Image: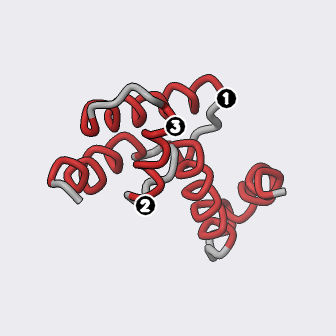
Amino acid sequence: MTASILLMQSFCIPVALYGLKCLNLNVHNLNSLNNLLIQAYMKIFCSNNIAIIKQCQFYCNQWSFSHEVTFLKIKFLNKLSLLDDIFLSHLYSLVGKNDLL
């Protein structure tokens, strides 16, 4: 992989994803984030073809932002369910449990 892809995956994407696991994003927000990632890959690979860019993302082991946010949210809610704090476990039972279903 090139240095620009490694830099994007190790720095830019985590910064863009920071804190999104706690938010309830709608489809428009997730599509905007996916578009951000597609635009970056278009610049790196000098292509405007979405099919080629999605293949580049696949072979670079890069999930779309919507999949990444969903995965992080599941991890966050699972960790929240395992905490011993009474307030947080009650908050999870009120709100977080429904998000996992």
Q: Nearer the viewer, residue 35 or 58?
A: 58
Distance from the alpha carbon under mark 1 to that under mark 3: 21 Å
Q: Are marks 3 and 2 in contact (CB under 8 Å)?
A: no
Identify the residue at image location x=42%, y=58%.
Answer: 59
**Picture coordinates of residue 60, whole percent (x, y):** 37, 58
Query: Where, by quadrant of the figure, is residue 36 drawn?
Result: top left
Q: In x, y percent, where is residue 21?
A: 54, 49
Q: What label does residue 19 carry, if any?
A: none
Secondary structure of the residue carrying tag 1 is helix
Question: Where is mark 3, residue-wise?
Answer: 51
Tell me which residue sits at (47%, 48%) in the image.
55
Q: Residue 62: x percent and y percent?
A: 43, 54
Label number found at residue 27: 1
- The image quarter containing residue 73 is bottom right
Q: Of discs 1 and 3, which sits in the foreground?
A: 3
Tell me the amino acid under the disc marked 1: Val
Label 3, secondary structure: give it: helix
Residue type beneath disc 3: Ala
Name the N-terminal-most of marks 1 and 3: 1
What's the amino acid at mark 2? Asn
Q: Which residue appears at 53% of the width and 52% of the height?
A: 68
For the image, the number of numbered tags is: 3
> Which comes before the other along the chain, label 2 or label 1?
1
In the visual, does 75 lie left or right of 11?
right
Q: Looking at the image, is 57 positioned above or below residue 49? A: below
Number of the front mark, 3 or 2: 3
Residue pointed to by mark 2: 61
